[in-house]
Image (cartoon, rainbow, N blue to C red):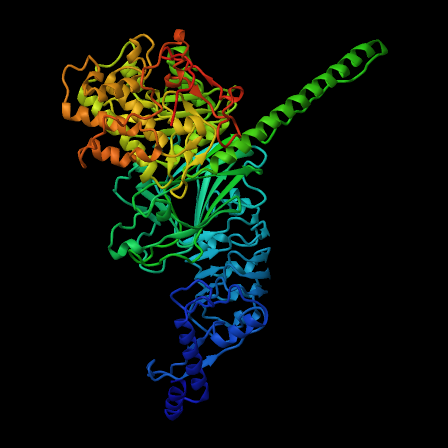
């Protein structure tokens, strides 16, 4: 094809230069079909090619072969000549470091991100008619040449992201047609800006000089955009004189929003486009944009709006606007106190869901905080489980050392550009918050007036010196203790923030205020882990604050386990975790408040609720659904290990929610079982787990059977106050089943009930408490039986498990201890795995449940 076209061009008399041009263009088109893997410059609407990632001989040869130094077409049109008939000339050249352009041109020249180096070439000065010059994000060095002022037709000049030195030449003031964009950001230029008269650029749309080392002179301070002095590399505002320790921004929002996480998110409706920035007044934070949408630009202010409501958040308004950028979006914290900070970024994608083609859109970008890349190829929809209109929050830990913070969202040319509409690409963010989390250490200056005016005051001087030494030692000791505590806090915070789906982190002061200084009047309950308090947050939400005991050997491990587990799962029958606090010696967990307390108090407590049969049946179904989700439906398969009535909470509508995930264990389907130290509550432990430490999800199934039995019977699983044959509830249930009197187990307070539902529940109880794990149904089948999706499985009368003796357990006075079936809690030894020893000297230690419903300790029973 190349030969044919060359022959045609020669035949028409265009000459060898035109032939060469055609051949080169064909090669260019051929490379275009191969994709842009080799041509790694950012694509644009006019000539824009580069060789990022290439260097040396390869780079130079590619520059020549592909003609992306620039092809300059100059039409010399005599009067009366049309473009179609105009002769075409070409000037092409290059050197070892940068493109050399020899022809006059009125076309824009784009050589962004091409990996070019060296000085800006002198031959640029010949482009007298050039209207736009973009050479950003290369490695150009040296000064901006004086001849730049001779390019009198320039409307756009963008040199950002190079290593250019100062000062800016005075000739720049001659560019009176520079009315579109002047971008010199991030070039490390040092200059007082006194040589340039910026009043000549009063019609300039975009002026971005941030992140250099400019000193703003009074002659230009009224002309340059406000806040420029605060966005310089070495001299940001408030350097050494911090004024703030937090800020929050509703990105793109037109008004401030008080959110569910206690922050007041400030409005951010500034019209940013091209290369521009905005700094708040008073100075607190700033934002800058770089880049311009060239493909069907949908919104001149670069803000996305939607009226959609967002699920899984109480702050839907925060996600109804988002600031976006075609290239680079930065937020700055100005005047921040030095120390450790938590940065929380909120995102939501608005691409349509479903099978329509618009749902194929991908917005992919990188996230940098303080210059450190925290996320590469971040995809909002990926973290939202491929759903639009779904909030995503990412939290990061970072340091502030010079009273300044930079959050940078950068598009690296990945994702889609035109789906669902033109111009939808680049970074996007809905909201952000920055909060102080720790001091960098104490800075103690001790000064002593040691002036000695007479020998008679030597004793005083000695005393002062000794006192100063003592104070100094105390200060050093205090600093050491504080530093160690701070380091511990930092390590724990890093560990906490590494958890996927980390919840909100509350300050200790917030929790202290919410619980009225942990008033005893706000205690909801207590257990081996510590206390639970009722609290009210500043936004009016009622919460339950679980305080893990500082003396517990397992506090931190269980604390982290609970956060990791409950953050990874969400279900209407699982309690919701609002957040946590690790500032105090006793870690705190903040849960949704459950108005009707725990299930054990509802059915067993003195002020018990009047639970009719329908309510009890729905509670059984709800618990079963929650366990089925944990075992079979969540992305992370979980065994709870401590299912009991006190770990089931009831909301205002008596909807049951499983709580207390401190002992939970993860597992996968390839495991037959996990051998582990025993943990949980005696009386709810499956035989194989209690005696051998073999853990599967069927341990939870067994515990569910015990809980369901307590619900319908209205009593604990062991009661020493009743007749001997009824003390052990499960044994009594089997006796009644064998004697065909199953309904006798029902709570006498239930005067009305559905007999068919009662029999389904009793059959489920018997199935769930079978002796061997494989004999127990999975929880999904339990749900199906209870809801009549499948037929009830009848249990044979002679199917009594062998761990239940034929005669009922006698009382303690008769030499048997029934505590295995009581409510005592057993805690797993830290770091211990494997089967439990069988010798009496190494039996697991357990403690009595400290609630008034606690029962006696116990010995073992016969098991399979």
The residue positioned 43% from the left and 39% from the top of the image is: 500
Task: Check the image and name the residue furthest to the right.
Answer: 455
Task: Tally the numbered discs.
Answer: 0
In the displayed structure, 103 sits above or below 345; it is below
Looking at the rendered image, the quarter that the C terminus falls into is: top left
Q: Where does the image place residue 751, in percent across and percent down from the top left?
A: 15, 14
Task: Check the image and name the residue furthest to the bottom.
Answer: 11
Residue 412's quadrant in the figure? bottom left
In depth, the one of 407 and 78 nearer the eye is: 407
In depth, the one of 803 and 24 nearer the eye is: 803
The residue positioned 73% from the left and 19% from the top of the image is: 448
The answer to whether one can see residue 653 in this image is: yes
Q: Where does the image place residue 617, in percent across and percent down from the top left?
A: 21, 24
Whether residue 437 sits left or right of residue 457 in the image: it is: left
The residue positioned 41% from the left and 33% from the top of the image is: 695
In depth, the one of 551 and 405 nearer the eye is: 551
Q: Where does the image place residue 373, in percent across and percent down from the top left?
A: 50, 48
Looking at the rendered image, the quarter that the N terminus falls into is: bottom left
In the displayed structure, 560 sits above or below 194; it is above
In the displayed structure, 456 sits above or below 159; it is above
In the displayed structure, 41 sits above or below 659; it is below
Q: Where does the image place residue 698, in percent across and percent down from the top left?
A: 35, 33
Residue 167's quadrant in the figure? bottom right
The answer to whether one can see residue 254 in this image is: no
Whether residue 295 sits left or right of residue 38 in the image: it is: left
Residue 524's quadrant in the figure? top left
The residue positioned 29% from the left and 8% from the top of the image is: 722
């Amino acid at each position: 094809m190349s030969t044919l076209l060359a022959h045609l061009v020669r035949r028409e008399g265009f000459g060898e230069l035109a032939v060469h041009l055609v051949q080169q263009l064909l090669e260019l088109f051929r490379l275009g079909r191969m994709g842009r893997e080799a041509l790694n410059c950012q694509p644009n609407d006019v000539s824009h090619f580069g060789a990022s990632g290439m260097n040396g001989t390869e780079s130079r040869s590619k520059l020549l072969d592909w003609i992306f130094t620039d092809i300059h077409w100059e039409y010399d049109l005599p009067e009366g000549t049309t473009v179609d008939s105009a002769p075409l000339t070409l000037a092409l050249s290059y050197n070892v470091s940068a493109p050399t352009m020899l022809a006059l041109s009125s076309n824009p020249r784009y050589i962004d991100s091409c990996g070019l180096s060296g000085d800006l070439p002198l031959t640029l000065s010949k482009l007298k008619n050039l209207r736009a010059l973009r050479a950003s994000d290369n490695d150009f060095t040296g000064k901006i040449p004086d001849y730049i002022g001779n390019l009198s037709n320039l409307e756009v000049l963008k040199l950002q992201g190079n290593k250019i030195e100062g000062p800016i030449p005075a000739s720049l003031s001659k560019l009176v047609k520079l009315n579109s964009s002047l971008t010199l950001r991030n070039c490390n230029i040092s200059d007082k800006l006194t040589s340039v008269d910026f009043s000549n650029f009063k019609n300039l749309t975009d002026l971005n000089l941030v992140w250099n080392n400019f000193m703003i002179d009074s002659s230009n301070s009224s002309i340059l955009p406000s806040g420029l002095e605060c966005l310089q590399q070495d001299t940001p505002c408030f350097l050494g004189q911090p004024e703030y320790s937090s800020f929050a921004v509703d990105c793109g929002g037109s008004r401030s929003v008080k959110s569910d996480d206690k922050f007041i998110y400030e409005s951010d409706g500034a019209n940013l486009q091209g290369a521009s920035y905005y700094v708040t007044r008073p100075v607190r934070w700033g934002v800058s944009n770089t880049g311009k949408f060239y493909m069907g630009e949908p919104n001149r202010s670069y803000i996305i709006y939607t009226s959609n409501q967002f699920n899984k958040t109480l702050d839907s308004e925060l996600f109804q606007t988002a600031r976006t950028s075609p290239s680079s979006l930065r937020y700055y914290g100005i005047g921040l106190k030095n120390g450790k900070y938590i940065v929380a970024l909120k995102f939501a994608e608005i691409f349509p869901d479903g099978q329509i083609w618009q749902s194929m859109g991908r917005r992919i970008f990188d996230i940098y905080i303080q210059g450190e890349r925290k996320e590469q190829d971040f995809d909002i929809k990926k973290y939202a489980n491929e759903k639009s209109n779904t909030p995503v929050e990412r939290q990061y830990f970072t340091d502030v050392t010079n009273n300044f913070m930079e959050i940078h969202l950068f598009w690296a040319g990945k994702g889609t550009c035109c789906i669902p509409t033109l111009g939808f690409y680049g970074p996007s963010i809905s909201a952000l918050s920055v909060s102080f989390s720790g001091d960098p250490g104490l800075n103690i200056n001790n000064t002593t007036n040691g002036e000695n005016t007479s020998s008679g005051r030597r004793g005083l001087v000695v005393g002062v010196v000794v006192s100063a030494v003592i104070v100094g030692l105390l200060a050093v000791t205090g600093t050491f203790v504080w530093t160690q505590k701070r380091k511990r806090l930092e390590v724990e915070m890093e560990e906490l923030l590494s958890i996927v789906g980390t919840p909100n982190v509350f300050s200790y002061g917030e929790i202290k205020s919410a619980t009225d200084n942990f008033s005893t009047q706000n205690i909801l309950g207590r257990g081996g882990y510590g206390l639970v308090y009722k609290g009210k947050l500043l936004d009016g939400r009622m919460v339950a604050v679980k305080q893990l005991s500082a003396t517990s050997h397992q506090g931190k491990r269980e604390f982290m386990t609970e956060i990791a587990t409950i953050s990874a799962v969400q279900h209407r029958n699982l309690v919701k975790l609002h957040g946590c606090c690790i500032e105090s010696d006793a870690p705190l967990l903040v849960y949704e408040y459950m108005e009707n307390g725990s299930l054990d108090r509802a059915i067993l407590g003195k002020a018990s609720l009047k639970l009719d049969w329908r309510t009890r049946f729905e509670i059984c179904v709800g618990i079963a659904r929650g366990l089925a989700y944990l075992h079979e439906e969540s992305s992370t398969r979980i065994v709870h290990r401590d299912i009991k009535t006190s770990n089931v909470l009831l909301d205002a509508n008596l909807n049951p929610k499983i709580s207390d995930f401190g002992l939970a264990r993860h597992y996968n389907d390839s495991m037959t079982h996990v051998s582990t130290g025993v943990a949980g509550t005696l009386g709810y432990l499956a035989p194989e787990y209690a005696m051998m430490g073999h853990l599967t999800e069927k341990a939870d199934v067994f515990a569910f059977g015990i809980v369901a039995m307590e619900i319908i019977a209205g009593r604990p699983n062991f009661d020493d106050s009743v007749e001997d044959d009824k003390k052990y509830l499960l044994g009594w249930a089997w006796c009644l089943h064998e004697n065909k009197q199953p309904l006798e187990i029902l709570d006498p307070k239930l005067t009305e009930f559905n007999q068919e539902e009662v029999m389904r529940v009793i059959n489920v109880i018997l199935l769930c408490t079978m002796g061997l794990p494989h004999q127990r149904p999975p929880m999904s089948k339990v749900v199906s039986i209870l809801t009549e999706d499948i037929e009830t499985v009848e249990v044979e009368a002679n199917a009594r498990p062998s761990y239940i003796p034929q005669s009922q357990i006698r009382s303690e006075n008769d030499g048997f201890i029934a505590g295995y079936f009581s409510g005592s809690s057993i805690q797993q030894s830290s770091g211990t795995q494997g089967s439990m020893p069988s010798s009496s000297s190494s039996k697991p230690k357990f403690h009595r449940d400290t609630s008034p419903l606690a029962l006696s300790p116990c010995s073992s029973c016969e098991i399979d």
